[in-house]
Image (cartoon, rainbow, N blue to C red):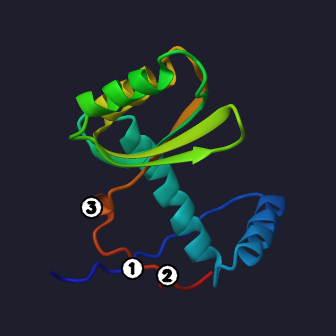
Amino acid sequence: MKAKSLCRFGISMAGDLVGQLDGMTKAKGYANRSQAVADMVRAQLIEHHGQMGTREIAGTVTLVYDHHKRNIQALLTDIQHEHGDLIIAAMHVHLDHHNCMEVLAIRGRADVVKEVADKLIAAKGVKHGKLTVTTTGKEFGKCMKETSGH
């Protein structure tokens, strides 16, 4: 597979915005602006791809619930078993005497992943839930983190 080449282009923006970009670049430990901008573009592309129904995405569904709530654990387990092809891992944590957190690793078509996440989050007894979307990595191929230049 042929390595992807770098493409150089110019961006114009307000000086104070560039100053903030430089501050963030330094604070996050990027070697240069190009690395910071490339990561921001990747993040926006991941969000964009996550909105497209047929794209494969990966992510986590985080749920917080009171395990004393009647049938909540059975309901969440049933939903997870119905979608075992999407849910690839699960972690259960006891936050305190009443509250538990479950973090589910999930992968599949964006529309189906969202549907399952919504079902879990809407389950009666869930206090808070969130789907966090990321990439499977496939759409970026061999990304070049070594982006250089300013």
Mark 3 residue type: Lys
Q: CA–CA distance between discs 2 and 1?
A: 8 Å
What residue would you read off at disc 1? 6
Quick check: 28 left or right of 122?
Answer: right
- Comparing 146 with 90, the one in front is 90
Residue 17 locus on image (x, y percent): 78, 59
Name which residue lies at 57% across and 85% down. Answer: 149
Residue 138 image label: 3
In the rendered structure, are the residues bearing label 2 and label 1 in contact, judged by CB atoms less than 8 Å apart? yes
Residue 78 locus on image (x, y percent): 32, 25
- Res 143 → quadrant: bottom left
- N-term mark: 2 or 1: 1
Q: Residue furthest left?
A: 1
Count residues near mark 1 (Cα–Cα under 10 Å), then give few for <14, some for 14-19, many for 20+. few
- Res 142 → quadrant: bottom left
- Comparing 132 with 39, the one in front is 132
- N-term mark: 1 or 3: 1
Name which residue lies at 52% across and 41% down. Answer: 102
Count residues near mark 3 (Cα–Cα under 10 Å), then give few for <14, some for 14-19, many for 20+. few
